[in-house]
Each structure stands twice: as structure tokens, then as C-alpha cells.
Amino acid sequence: MTGSKELDQVKEELVEGKAKYLRPSECRNRMRRTLTKEFDAIIEGFVEAAKKGSCPHVKLATELLKPTRTGPSRKKGTATKYWEMLQREEREREQLQNEQLAAAQELQGTDGNGVLTTRF
């Protein structure tokens, strides 16, 4: 026996006659239930292996201790992306107009204050 009643029950079902096939959702649910029941023992075994110097266990332990969120929890919506694009285009348009105005003033020979400047 393996010590887990549920695992022993599944093995007995497989041995008896036809094998009972599980749907993917049933597999996930069974795995979640098993992990939930055995979580404390799994963590204890994991920590013991890490204490003994098992590099993969230590690496995994440090990865598990890191915060999981690295960025915003939600992606930007279409409306937000569109609004930002419009703002960016407006800034570019204003920058282009300022450059054109500066170039026109340079051609006319005046500075921004209307004072005539001469170039040698």
C-alpha cells in the first residue's frame, strides 16, 4: 500500500476489469484534491531536501519566495491604447509645428521675439 487511500483506490480500480478513464477535468480535480490534502507533507519534504543541499530544491525554494506579480494585473484595453495613440500623435504634431515655425523664423531672419538678426 502507498499510504494514500485515494491512490490505492485508483490502483484497485485499474486492476479490476476495465480501466476507468478520466476526463481531463476529473484528472485536474483529483490532482488538486490530492495536492491540497498532502500539501503540508510536500512542503516539509521539499524543505528537508533543500536543507540537505539539493540545488534544484534550493533554486525552486528561492523562486517560490519571489513575488509573483511583475507588472500590472490587467492589460490595457482597446480604448486606453487608442487614447494613448491619439495623445502621442498630438504631441508629434505639435513638435512638428514647432520645428516648422522655428525653420520659418530662421529663414525670415528673426528670432522668436521679432528682432531682426543678421548672420555672417
Image (cartoon, rainbow, N blue to C red):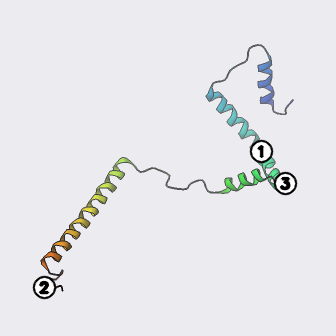
Mark 1 or mark 3: which comes first in sequence?
1
Residue 52 marker: 3
| Badge 2 element | loop
The three-letter code of the residue at mark 2 reads: Leu
- Front in this rendered view, residue 105 or 59: 105
Classify residue 66 as left or right of residue 53: left
Q: Position of residue 60 (x, y in %)?
A: 71, 51
Q: How far apart are labels 1 and 3 at the CA level?
A: 16 Å
Classify residue 16 as left or right of residue 107: right
Q: How far apart are labels 3 and 2 at the CA level?
A: 83 Å
Q: Which residue is mark 2?
A: 116
Q: Which residue corresponds to the image point at 77% horizontal and 44% vertical from the top-left? A: 42
User: Within the image, what quadrant is residue 6 found in?
Assistant: top right
Q: Which residue is mark 1?
A: 42
The three-letter code of the residue at mark 1 reads: Ile
User: Within the image, what quadrant is residue 103 found in?
Assistant: bottom left
CB within 8 Å, label 1 to label 3: no
- Which of the two marks, 1 or 2, is nearer to us in this view? 2
CB within 8 Å, label 3 to label 2: no
